[in-house]
Amino acid sequence: MPSPVEKRPLTGASMTPAYDPRTDPNCIFCKIAAGQIPCYKLHEDEWVVAFLDIAPLSVGHCLVVPKAHYETLDRMPAEWAGACAAVLPRLSRAVVAATAAAGWNVLQNNGRIAGQAVGHVHFHIIPRREGDGLGYRWPAGKLEASEAQRLLAAITGKL
Ligand code: AMP
Ligand code: ZN
């Protein structure tokens, strides 16, 4: 049986200040968020901008981008992550309805090894259709109990 995870808040000093739209002058998504370069904008609020991906994997592929520069998800305060997540259901609904998709992937890449090309956190919404040829590799393994226990201790110890 997995051991119970200690109930510690997953937020901390990094949460404050909550609204701190830091920018990187060399970052293309910061420039889009600031309106300095154009995009096909789908949504904008105080925290987030969403726009069509310029090199779409499928019809309707779009991006949800926080208006603050954090390179990867782990560096981002919870409020910013929450602001991005808050947009996903409604935008997914609209994109899927407007483009007659059968499903969609939400994808968020961190680090070059994971396919991140733009070093500013963003969430892809990628509509999927039968025969779209996108696919994905999911070579599932098997989780052994001893490995699970080791991971529980290692990961919860870092939370
Ligand atoms: P990632 O590989 O997860 O970093 O994805 C970066 C995404 O940003 C790619 O899908 C690009 O096509 C997209 N992208 C890069 N520049 C722009 C831009 N100016 N407008 C819209 N999408 C962009
Ligand atoms: Zn940026």
Image (cartoon, helix red, strand yellow):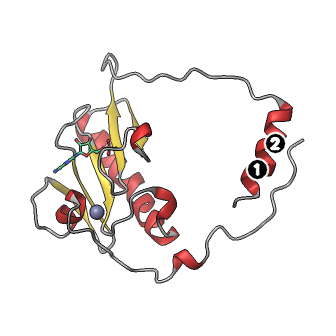
Is the C-beta separation of discs 2 and 1 under 8 Å? yes
Q: Residue furthest bottom?
A: 17
Percent x, y for residue 149?
Answer: 84, 41
Label 1 crowd (10 A; few <14 / some 14-19 / many >=20): few
State which quarter of the image contains the N terminus: top right
* Looking at the image, residue 138 lies above or below residue 74: above
Label 2 crowd (10 A; few <14 / some 14-19 / many >=20): few
- Amino acid type for the residue under numbered disc 1: Ala
Residue closest to the eye, 1 or 112: 112
Query: Image check: 54 left or right of 15?
Result: left
Query: Image check: 31 left or right of 118?
Result: left
Percent x, y for residue 114?
Answer: 44, 39
Q: Residue at x 33, y 76 (%)?
A: 21
Q: Residue at x 61, y 76 (%)?
A: 12
Please name the residue that numbered disc 1 is placed on.
154
* Looking at the image, residue 44 lies above or below residue 148: below
Q: Which mark is residue 116?
A: none
Q: Is mark 1 within 8 Å of ligand 1?
A: no
* Looking at the image, residue 23 lies above or below residue 52: below
Residue closest to the eye, 75 or 3: 75
Percent x, y for residue 91?
Answer: 33, 52
Q: Residue at x 34, y 43 (%)?
A: 125
